[in-house]
């Protein structure tokens, strides 16, 4: 197996605010630890993945999803001999900026902020780690490495809207240490695609648990039909739940194998030999084969029809949207009751968006009840 360590991000360019190196941990290990110890990471425990967090303990939340993404990203990076710690850090941090009530909450907050600079959960993650998580006397934020900032900024590739980045973060804040048009590191690309692997598979698992569809219905998707065939004659009432775990495990395994093989092919075909080659590439290098991508599109369509557009899921999400909009309007009228004066003096509406996006589902629900 080829060693790709020469195109991994092992040496850091440093941090926005200079710090002395640790004897015991690499800069990327320190980044990971700072994420794990942050209040924003802890709050992911009570934030919606698909099902509103108050519904029960058996469904995934943002924190369990983030840990699962990190595990997948770390496994892929380890096999390719890339920087496992950087891939893990990016995976653990990628959802910090999510609002309560999942994507429905983000849509609602985006609508509220439409005339005040907008809202984007990926950029909100950067706001959190650069400005809002304050635990150090010498600087604001967590002062993570340039490589981590770059990877989070480019979670979906180079930023398409630099004006939005400037509006929400401020380009000067990066101190000319990030080249926006460059492709993200391989570790960042692995983290982003591990997100896709995790949520596609685990949303299926949660959907079956919630009785939105049955395991047998997955055979509508050829990819799952082929896996299901292997176990069809062994599945009975006693081991039905275990069979679900087995099929999802096989699915994740097949996706990871396809991703690794296709990525290796891309690196060879594009003659990628240095980190600079990765950054200057005209496309993302970590991706699935066409056949697997087609299967993923089928899975997403299945989940859209059977889960995300389910009337009960939509009802709960719409209730979450209403709560976000009510809170925004109420807080806007008496912001000092909720937010420190210093934050409001810098940008009132951005401070309100920061405050609401940082809430857990249950905190937002309870605050809304208290306002009535």
Image (tube, rainbow, N blue to C red):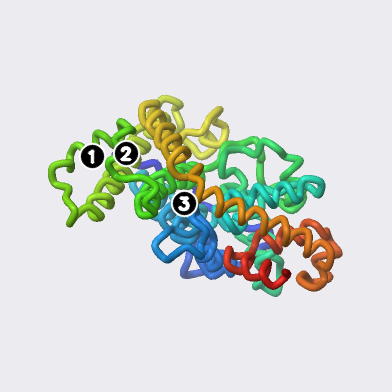
Image point (83%, 60%), residue name: 348
Q: CA distance from mark 2 to mark 3?
A: 31 Å
Q: Position of residue 118 (x, y in %)?
A: 74, 47
Contact check, label 2 and label 1, Cβ < 8 Å = yes
Contact check, label 3 and label 1, Cβ < 8 Å = no
Q: Residue furthest right?
A: 345
Query: Disc 1 marks which residue?
Result: 228
Helix, strand or loop at disc 3? Answer: helix
Query: Disc 3 marks which residue?
Result: 87
Image point (80%, 57%), residue name: 349
Q: Position of residue 3 (x, y in %)?
A: 35, 42
Depth check, front residue: 74 or 17: 74
Rendering quarter of residue 303:
top left
Image point (68%, 57%), residue name: 324
Query: Disc 2 marks which residue?
Result: 218
Image point (23%, 50%), residue name: 243
Which quadrant holds the N terminus? top left
Q: Is residue 269 above or below residue 55?
A: above
Q: CA distance from mark 3 to mark 1?
A: 31 Å
Depth check, front residue: 155 or 97: 97
Frontmost of labels 2 and 3 is 2
Q: Position of residue 173 (x, y in %)?
A: 74, 53
Contact check, label 2 and label 3, Cβ < 8 Å = no
């Amino acid at each position: 197996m080829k060693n790709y360590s020469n195109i991994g991000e092992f040496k850091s360019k440093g941090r926005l605010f200079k710090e002395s190196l640790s004897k015991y941990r690499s800069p990327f290990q320190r980044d990971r630890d700072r994420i794990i110890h942050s209040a924003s990471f802890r709050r992911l425990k009570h934030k919606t993945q698909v099902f509103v967090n108050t519904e029960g303990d058996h469904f995934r939340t943002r924190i369990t999803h983030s840990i699962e993404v990190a595990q997948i990203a770390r496994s892929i990076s380890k096999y390719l001999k890339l920087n496992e710690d950087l891939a893990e850090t990016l995976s653990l941090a990628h959802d910090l900026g999510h609002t309560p009530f999942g994507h429905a909450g983000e849509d609602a907050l985006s609508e509220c902020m439409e005339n005040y600079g907008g809202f984007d959960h990926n950029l909100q993650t950067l706001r959190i780690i650069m400005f809002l998580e304050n635990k150090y006397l010498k600087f604001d934020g967590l002062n993570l490495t340039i490589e981590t900032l770059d990877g989070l900024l480019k979670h979906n590739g180079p930023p398409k809207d630099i004006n939005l980045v400037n509006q929400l973060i401020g380009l000067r804040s990066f101190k000319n240490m990030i080249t926006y048009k460059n492709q993200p590191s391989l570790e960042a690309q692995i983290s982003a695609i591990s997100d896709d692997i995790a949520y596609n598979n685990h949303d299926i698992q949660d959907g079956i648990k919630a009785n939105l569809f049955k395991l047998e219905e997955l055979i509508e998707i050829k990819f799952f039909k082929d896996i299901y065939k292997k176990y069809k004659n062994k599945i009975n009432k006693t081991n039905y739940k275990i069979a679900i775990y087995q099929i999802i495990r096989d699915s994740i395994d097949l996706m990871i194998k396809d991703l690794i093989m296709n990525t290796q092919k891309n690196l060879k075909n594009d003659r990628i030999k240095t980190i600079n080659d990765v950054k200057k590439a005209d496309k993302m290098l970590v991706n699935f084969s066409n056949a697997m991508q087609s299967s993923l599109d089928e899975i997403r369509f299945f989940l859209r029809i059977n889960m995300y557009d389910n009337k009960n899921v939509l009802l709960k999400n719409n209730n979450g949207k209403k709560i976000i909009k009510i809170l925004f309007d109420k807080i806007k009228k008496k912001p000092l009751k909720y937010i420190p004066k210093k934050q409001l003096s810098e940008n009132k509406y951005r401070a309100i968006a920061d405050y609401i996006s940082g809430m857990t589902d249950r905190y937002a629900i309870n605050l809304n009840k208290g306002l009535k």
